[in-house]
Amino acid sequence: QVQLVESGGGLVQTGGSLRLSCTAPGFTLDYYAIHWFRQAPGKEREGISCISSHGGRIIYADSVKGRFAISRDDAKNTVNLQMNSLRPEDTAVYHCATGGPADCSSLYSPWEYDYWGQGTQVTVSS
């Protein structure tokens, strides 16, 4: 069983930045695409970014494009999501996921992914 662990969430003011991380103790992420999702209260889980194995392909949702940057550090077995210019509408629980499509050719649906982290809360105050 693969368990992903997210960290880095918190409370930030509008315009601020946070850096989320996703790792998998005991499991090597190198050959897997990693997808970040978020879920706000009362809303469906939304795919926001994906990075393919070794970072060859990256994709973003329009809602975060130009503000968020996904990267991976295979030496540290970590995928990061740098979030800048945060807005109140970015408030959500952020999850990383893997075990789904490997190509990141689109933002796939949550049910395509087998392995998830517990999520980290991001709250942006106005």
Image (cartoon, rainbow, N blue to C red):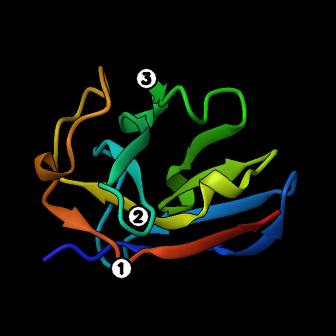
For the N terminus, the quadrant is: bottom left
Q: Residue at x 69, y 50 (%)?
A: 82
Q: Is residue 20 left or right of residue 13?
A: left
Alpha carbons under labels 2 and 1: distance apart? 7 Å
- 72 up-or-down from 38: above or below: above
Q: Earlier in the sequence, mark 3 or mark 2?
A: 3
Q: Position of residue 43 (x, y in %)?
A: 35, 58
Query: Where is residue 98, by image quadrant?
Result: bottom left
Of residue 21 and residue 89, the one placed in the foreground of this image is 89
Q: Position of residue 21 (x, y in %)?
A: 57, 64
Cβ–Cβ below 8 Å for labels 2 and 1? yes
Find disc 3 in the rendering and name its residue: 57
Of residue 23 and residue 97, the one placed in the foreground of this image is 97
Q: Residue at x 12, y 51 (%)?
A: 111
Query: Where is residue 96, by image quadrant?
Result: bottom left
Q: Position of residue 75 (x, y in %)?
A: 54, 56
Find disc 1 in the rendering and name its residue: 118
Q: Amino acid at mark 2?
A: His
Q: Residues within 10 Å of mark 2 (few under 14, many from 20)?
A: many
- 48 up-or-down from 86: above or below: above
